[in-house]
Structure formats: structure tokens, C-alpha cells
Image: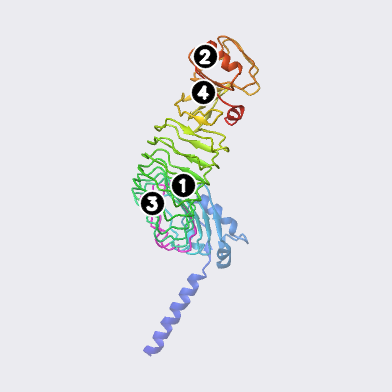
Amino acid sequence: MKKWTWMFALTLAALCVCASAGADVAIDETNFPDENFRSCVARFDRNGDGIFSDEELGRVTEIECERVADLTGIGYFTALTRLYCTGNRLTEIDLSRNTALTELYCGKNRLTALDVSGNTMLRVLQCYENPLTELDVSRNTALTVLDCGYNDLAELDVRCNTSLVYLICQGNRLTELDLRSNAALTLLACGGNLLTELDVSGNTALAALMCHNNRLTELDLKCNTGLTELYCAGNLLTALDVSRNTALTQLYCAGNLLTALDVSRNTALTELSCEDNRLNEMDLSFTPNLFIAVLYGAKTEGEYAEYILDYNYFSADSRVTVITVPSSYLLLPADLTAAEDEAFLNIRADAVIVPSGVASIGANAFPAGVRIYGPASSAAMTWAAMNECAFFPCTEEWIAALR
């Protein structure tokens, strides 16, 4: 008798498990409390009966939702591989049943915690711009992309994430970052942290390195010969050797303590920013592709284009003296042929850039003491001389690059 009772109990338990696994799910407030999320997933109800069958749930591999504050019910979609819920009002998210996930985009929410320990198939994780103070990705060994920038992380351990190709962790509170296990990295963005040192000697595949606005006193890039973009501005660097980084096209090293910068081997450079250092002179004669050294610009509203920025000036012969120029300037329209008397007398900019098309300039066109930039032997040069204003020669190509 006991034998039959035991067998009956096992059979009943098995039936209950099967029934639970294949149970229909009503698309209602109980299972999906958030109205917007409920409306979002309702489109997967193929027959429109207001109930998800096991087959219907199994067909759902991607979900993208907006204006959602609660993702309760997401666990029913166990076949889900891609979840995009960026830019919502989520404070928590339970993905424990979504073990098939390979891509998770949950940035720009209000998440204070994120548990992805059960999502071991994740390849892409974007959780930027949340107030996360912790993030454990030790079990997510398949990750190739991790973007956890602009959170509140004091630590980040990526030693188990050996497949990482893109790592974006800028805008946190990291004081150290161990990358010795991440040889596949091609992009590293770790700017805006509290790093005092950064070892990328083992990251020989790096093409882009953004380590700006930290506390780095040195940066060894001898092994990173494939670098094309380097952003190391706003640190405490006293020296920077880029002689082996011959593929560099963009170099941003402003706001350091550099007394010298040799770019003679960086012939591919197209953009260079090195203002706010301690440089006295530079030789750019070996950088024929460098078309602009004016960066950090932001156009503002106005009748004429006004840019607020800091930049370096370099002359046509490519041998330059690095100088500090005004933080604002007025760029005259390209089709302007004459600057009438008093036309720009009341501008607030500290410098005026005059294209070669301006053939005549009124005696009082610009305020006294303003700095003038324009092509050599132009009306601008003559006006500057007559009014005892500083004049800086530049090419039309240089001016055109500002527009």
C-alpha cells in the first residue's frame, strides 16, 4: 500500500510540474502590472485571445519597450535573447528566468542593483547612466561589449571577461582597473574616473583609448602600435611618447603637464589637441594630413556663427609656437565681402576670423584690441596693422574646417 501511495505522489507531482510549465498566461494586470509594458507585450498575442500560450511565449526572442516603470512579467519570456529597455523609469529588473539572453540594453534608468549572474550567455551588456554602485560580471564570460559608464561604481572586476572587445566604464569612481586578462580589447573608455595608473601593455589590439580626466602621471603606449585614437586630456602627464603609435589619427592630450610633444612619426594625424600644457614649440612638418588643431567647439545661436573653444594656432610652414588664444571668437560668414564700419563693433568675442573673401573692412568694424585671424596679405592683415591689433595668419582650409 505504501508503495502505491508513493508512486501516486510522484505521478501527481510530475503532472503539476508539467501543468505549470505549459500553463497559459493571461495578459492582465496581475501578470503584467505596468500598463505600458502590458501593451508592449500584447502584440505577441498572435490569436488575440488575451492569453499567452506556451507556444506564443516561446516565439518571443526580442522585446523593446518604452515609458515603462515595471518589467514584472518579463520572466515568462524564457526564450528571450534581446531586451532593449533603455531610457525608462526602471528601479529594478528580475532577469533570473531569462537565461537565454545574449543582449541586454538597460541604460538610462534608475537601477540601483543589477543581477546578471544567471545570464551567462550575455554577449552585450549596456547599463550606462544608472545609479549602480556594484556590478558583478564574473559569470558573464561570453561578454564582448560592456558599457557601464556614468554609474557610481567604485570597483569593476573584468578579469573573467576575456572575450571583451569594447569596455566603456567612464564616469564612475574607479581607482584601479586590471586589464591583464582582456587581450581582445579594441576600445577602452575609462575617462572620468580616479585612476592614478593604467597598464595597457597587454592590450595590444587597442585601436581607441579614452583615459581622459583621471589622475594619471604616466602612460606607456609602446605596445599599442595599432592605436588610431588617443584621448588622454585632463591628467597629470609630464611626458607622452607616441613614437610607436604611427597609426594615430586623433590625439587629444590637452590639460596635462607636458613640456614637449614629438609627433614627427605620427604622419597619419588629422586632429591634434594639446592646449593647456607647458609646451613652448612644436614641429608639425612631418604631419601633412593634419587639417585642424581647433577642438572642443560648440556653435551658439546668433546672426553670425560664434564658437566657444580653446585651441592652438599653427602657421603655414608647420613650425609652430603653441600659444593660448581667447576662449571665444567670431567666425565671419564665408560669403561676406565687406565688413562695414561699426558692423561688428559690439561683439562679445575676443577674436575675429576673417575669410579671404572680405576685401574691405571699415576703420571701426571691430572693437579695439581684438585679435584678428585671416590669410596673410589679406584685408584683415592690413586692418590689424593699422589698428595695432594682433594678427595671426591662417589658411582658407583652416578657416573652412571651422564651419
Residue highlighted by disc 1? 209
Query: What distance separates the C-alpha of mark 1 from that of mark 4?
Result: 31 Å
Considering the image in quadrants, where does the C terminus appear?
top right
Along the line of sight, which residue is nearer the eye, 129 or 349? 349
Q: Is residue 398 above or below residue 110?
A: above
Query: What distance separates the C-alpha of mark 1 from that of mark 2?
Result: 43 Å
Span highlighted in magenta in the image: 110-139
Residue highlighted by disc 3? 199
Q: Earlier in the sequence, mark 1 or mark 3?
A: 3
Along the line of sight, which residue is nearer the eye, 154 or 201? 201
Residue highlighted by disc 4? 329
Residue at disc 1, secondary structure: strand
Question: How many other residues sit within 10 Å of disc 4, few (<14), some (14-19) or many (≥20)?
Answer: many
Q: Are marks 2 and 3 in contact (CB under 8 Å)?
A: no
Residue highlighted by disc 2? 346
Q: Are marks 4 and 3 in contact (CB under 8 Å)?
A: no
**Magenta span contains residue 135:** yes
Nearer the observer, disc 1 or disc 2? 1
